[in-house]
Protein backbone atom coordinates (compact mmCIF):
# COMPACT_ATOMS: atom_id res chain seq x y z
CA UNK A 1 0.00 0.00 0.00
CA UNK A 2 1.33 3.45 -0.95
CA UNK A 3 1.56 6.02 1.81
CA UNK A 4 0.17 9.49 1.18
CA UNK A 5 3.01 12.03 1.75
CA UNK A 6 0.54 14.55 3.16
CA UNK A 7 -0.69 12.11 5.80
CA UNK A 8 2.92 11.41 6.79
CA UNK A 9 3.52 15.15 7.27
CA UNK A 10 0.34 15.48 9.30
CA UNK A 11 1.37 12.55 11.50
CA UNK A 12 4.84 14.07 11.99
CA UNK A 13 3.33 17.43 12.94
CA UNK A 14 1.08 15.78 15.54
CA UNK A 15 3.88 13.68 16.99
CA UNK A 16 6.44 16.49 16.92
CA UNK A 17 4.58 19.77 17.54
CA UNK A 18 7.77 21.81 17.07
CA UNK A 19 7.61 20.94 13.35
CA UNK A 20 4.28 22.75 13.05
CA UNK A 21 5.45 26.04 14.57
CA UNK A 22 3.55 29.26 13.91
CA UNK A 23 4.75 31.92 11.56
CA UNK A 24 4.65 35.69 11.86
CA UNK A 25 2.49 37.34 9.19
CA UNK A 26 2.17 40.84 7.78
CA UNK A 27 -1.31 41.55 9.08
CA UNK A 28 -1.99 45.13 8.00
CA UNK A 29 -0.22 48.09 6.40
CA UNK A 30 -0.84 51.74 5.48
CA UNK A 31 0.97 53.68 2.74
CA UNK A 32 0.92 57.17 1.17
CA UNK A 33 -1.90 58.61 3.22
CA UNK A 34 -2.91 61.64 1.12
CA UNK A 35 0.72 62.42 0.28
CA UNK A 36 1.88 63.42 3.76
CA UNK A 37 3.53 60.06 4.55
CA UNK A 38 3.30 60.62 8.30
CA UNK A 39 1.17 57.58 9.19
CA UNK A 40 2.79 54.75 7.22
CA UNK A 41 2.99 51.49 9.15
CA UNK A 42 3.26 47.72 8.92
CA UNK A 43 1.61 45.53 11.55
CA UNK A 44 3.03 42.06 12.22
CA UNK A 45 0.90 39.39 13.91
CA UNK A 46 1.72 36.14 15.69
CA UNK A 47 -1.25 33.79 15.14
CA UNK A 48 0.42 30.98 17.05
CA UNK A 49 0.22 29.75 20.62
CA UNK A 50 3.87 30.44 21.48
CA UNK A 51 5.81 33.71 21.63
CA UNK A 52 8.22 34.27 18.72
CA UNK A 53 11.51 36.17 18.91
CA UNK A 54 11.80 38.43 15.85
CA UNK A 55 15.08 40.09 16.88
CA UNK A 56 17.19 40.95 13.84
CA UNK A 57 14.42 40.24 11.33
CA UNK A 58 14.29 42.68 8.40
CA UNK A 59 11.29 44.47 6.95
CA UNK A 60 11.96 45.82 3.47
CA UNK A 61 10.93 45.45 -0.10
CA UNK A 62 11.75 45.67 -3.77
CA UNK A 63 10.66 47.75 -6.73
CA UNK A 64 11.69 47.57 -10.40
CA UNK A 65 14.83 49.62 -9.61
CA UNK A 66 16.01 47.25 -6.86
CA UNK A 67 15.90 47.02 -3.07
CA UNK A 68 14.03 49.64 -1.03
CA UNK A 69 14.87 50.94 2.42
CA UNK A 70 14.98 48.15 5.00
CA UNK A 71 14.33 48.25 8.73
CA UNK A 72 15.95 45.84 11.19
CA UNK A 73 13.92 44.83 14.23
CA UNK A 74 15.93 45.44 17.43
CA UNK A 75 17.34 42.81 19.78
CA UNK A 76 15.06 41.32 22.45
CA UNK A 77 11.90 41.84 20.39
CA UNK A 78 9.34 39.11 21.00
CA UNK A 79 5.76 38.96 19.75
CA UNK A 80 3.55 37.20 22.27
CA UNK A 81 1.12 34.50 21.17
CA UNK A 82 -1.79 36.29 19.53
CA UNK A 83 0.17 39.55 19.75
CA UNK A 84 1.06 42.36 17.37
CA UNK A 85 4.15 44.44 16.60
CA UNK A 86 3.80 47.74 14.71
CA UNK A 87 6.62 49.37 12.74
CA UNK A 88 5.69 52.88 11.68
CA UNK A 89 6.06 56.61 11.80
CA UNK A 90 5.53 58.88 14.81
CA UNK A 91 1.91 59.66 13.83
CA UNK A 92 0.89 56.00 14.17
CA UNK A 93 -1.06 54.93 17.27
CA UNK A 94 0.34 51.94 19.17
CA UNK A 95 3.64 51.98 17.26
CA UNK A 96 6.32 49.69 18.73
CA UNK A 97 9.22 50.72 16.50
CA UNK A 98 9.41 54.22 15.01
CA UNK A 99 10.97 54.57 11.54
CA UNK A 100 11.33 57.47 9.13
CA UNK A 101 9.80 55.84 6.08
CA UNK A 102 8.76 52.38 4.99
CA UNK A 103 7.38 52.79 1.48
CA UNK A 104 8.65 54.61 -1.60
CA UNK A 105 5.07 54.93 -2.93
CA UNK A 106 5.76 53.26 -6.23
CA UNK A 107 5.39 49.77 -7.70
CA UNK A 108 6.90 47.78 -4.84
CA UNK A 109 6.67 44.67 -2.71
CA UNK A 110 6.86 44.37 1.06
CA UNK A 111 8.97 41.56 2.55
CA UNK A 112 9.61 40.26 6.05
CA UNK A 113 12.81 38.21 6.35
CA UNK A 114 14.48 36.20 9.09
CA UNK A 115 18.01 36.32 7.74
CA UNK A 116 17.86 34.97 4.19
CA UNK A 117 14.52 33.23 4.83
CA UNK A 118 11.43 34.96 3.45
CA UNK A 119 8.79 34.84 6.20
CA UNK A 120 5.97 36.76 4.48
CA UNK A 121 5.56 39.09 1.49
CA UNK A 122 2.95 41.26 -0.16
Image: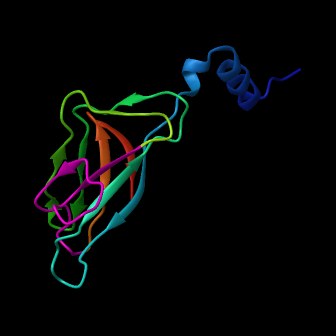
* Rendered image quadrant of residue 13: top right
User: What is the quadrant of the C terminus in the image?
Assistant: bottom left
Where residue 1 sits in the image (x, y, percent)?
Answer: 89, 20
Left or right placement of residue 81 versus residue 93 in this view: right
Left or right placement of residue 26 versus residue 34 in this view: right
Left or right placement of residue 65 versus residue 4 in this view: left
Residue at position x 43%, y 41% in the image: 24
Where residue 21 sits in the image (x, y, percent)?
Answer: 53, 28
Q: Is 19 or 43 nearer to us in this picture?
A: 43
What is the chief secondary structure element of the magenta stretch? loop
Residue at position x 58%, y 27% in the image: 20
Q: Is 5 or 70 nearer to us in this picture?
A: 70
Region of the chain picked out in magenta, as a range: 84-106
Relative to 24, say whether 52 is above or below. above
- Furthest-right residue in this view: 1
Where residue 103 sits in the image (x, y, percent)?
Answer: 20, 66
- Count of numbered marks: 0
- Furthest-bottom residue in this view: 34
* Rendered image quadrant of residue 74: top left
Amino acid sequence: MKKNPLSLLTTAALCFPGLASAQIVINEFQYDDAGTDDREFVELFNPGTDPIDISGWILGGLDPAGANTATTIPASTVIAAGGYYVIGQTGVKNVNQVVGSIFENDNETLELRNGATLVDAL
